[in-house]
Image: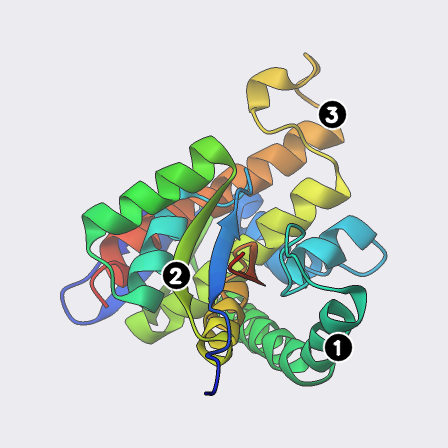
Amino acid sequence: MELIRHSDGRWSLARVSELEYLMLSRIQESADPSGCDQALERLYPSPVAPTAQLDHEAALSIEEDWREYTGPEIRDGFSQALEKVALDIASASVEDDEGYEYYGMTLPDAHAESWCSALNQARLVLHHRHELPEEAEEMGVNPVSEEWIVVLQSEIYGMIMEFLIKEVLWDQ
Amino acid sequence: MKAWPPPWQVLIFDDPVNLMSFVTMVIRRIFGYSEQKATELMLQVHNKGRAIVWTGDREKAELFVQQLQSYQLLAAMEPVE
């Protein structure tokens, strides 16, 4: 995979292999926290710090308001970002290079924010759903386990995020 | 004489999954801090588990927490003791 910054307000994901494209296609599914309480709690945490010196009723009142008014706005933002990214991925072009198929897409800078949100959400949910260790070195030695594939997926998402943060979003 | 309501502080908590560059970018963007200050706060989150990133009135604290959570940062608020 090649990540390219253009000077005309666009960026590209180029020479994306079939495996990488498969992983990109899984962003939306991977970012879905359904059925994983830890991921749900992580994506939609309480607005009240656990150390807050508040009486129980005051904290409850803030949390109820948050659930009713703010939570849905945050959820909508996440959903919109995921939908935009899914459309971008579905619109990828396919190139044939000496018998190998590669995918590619050139996208406007305005999509970078949604990509960062979707990739980050997917990373968070993957780590909670699969209870991944903080560092790959802490993992077992079997490199073909599902856990390793999920780590690879998360690393690819993180690599794209680093590119977008440094090359596209940093000065916006 | 009317008493001022106590100020609230906005905190970011460490999350090992979030990229350090992402946390720094979000702090810069939301609070308008310099790159140096944003980096210092990010490192405080990373090394100490949490950092107070802003202090002020409750309404604005809520808005900042909403913005931070919209970037999927682990953020919350509390009244200053």
Q: Element type at marker 3?
A: loop
For the residues labelled 2 and 1, the Cα–Cα distance comes to 22 Å
Callout 2: SS: strand
Which quarter of the figure is the N terminus of chain B placed in?
A: bottom left
Q: Is the residue at mark 2 from the same chain as the one at mark 3?
A: no
Are tags 1 and 3 found on a single chain? Answer: yes
Q: Quadrant of residue A44?
A: bottom right
Q: Which residue is mark 1?
A: A61
| Residue closer to the observer: B1 or A130 | B1
User: What residue would you read off at disc 3?
Assistant: A145
Q: Percent x, y for residue A108?
A: 31, 73
Of tags 2 and 3, the one toward the viewer is: 2
Q: Earlier in the sequence, mark 1 or mark 3?
A: 1
- Residue reaching furthest to the top: A141
Is A50 displayed left or right of A64 in the figure? Answer: left
State the image coordinates of residue A48 (x, y, percent, origin top left).
Answer: 64, 62
Decide: few, some or many residues near mark 1? Use Cα within 10 Å; few <14, some 14-19, many ≥20: few
Q: Eyeballing the image, is A90 above or below A38?
A: below
Residue bearing mark 2: B54
Left or right of B44 on screen, residue A28: right
Label 2 is placed on what type of residue?
A: Trp
Looking at this view, is B32 or A62 the one in front? A62
Q: Are marks 2 and 1 on the same chain?
A: no
Dot 3 falls on which chain? A
Callout 2: residue from which chain? Answer: B
Residue B40 x, y percent position in the rendering: 29, 42
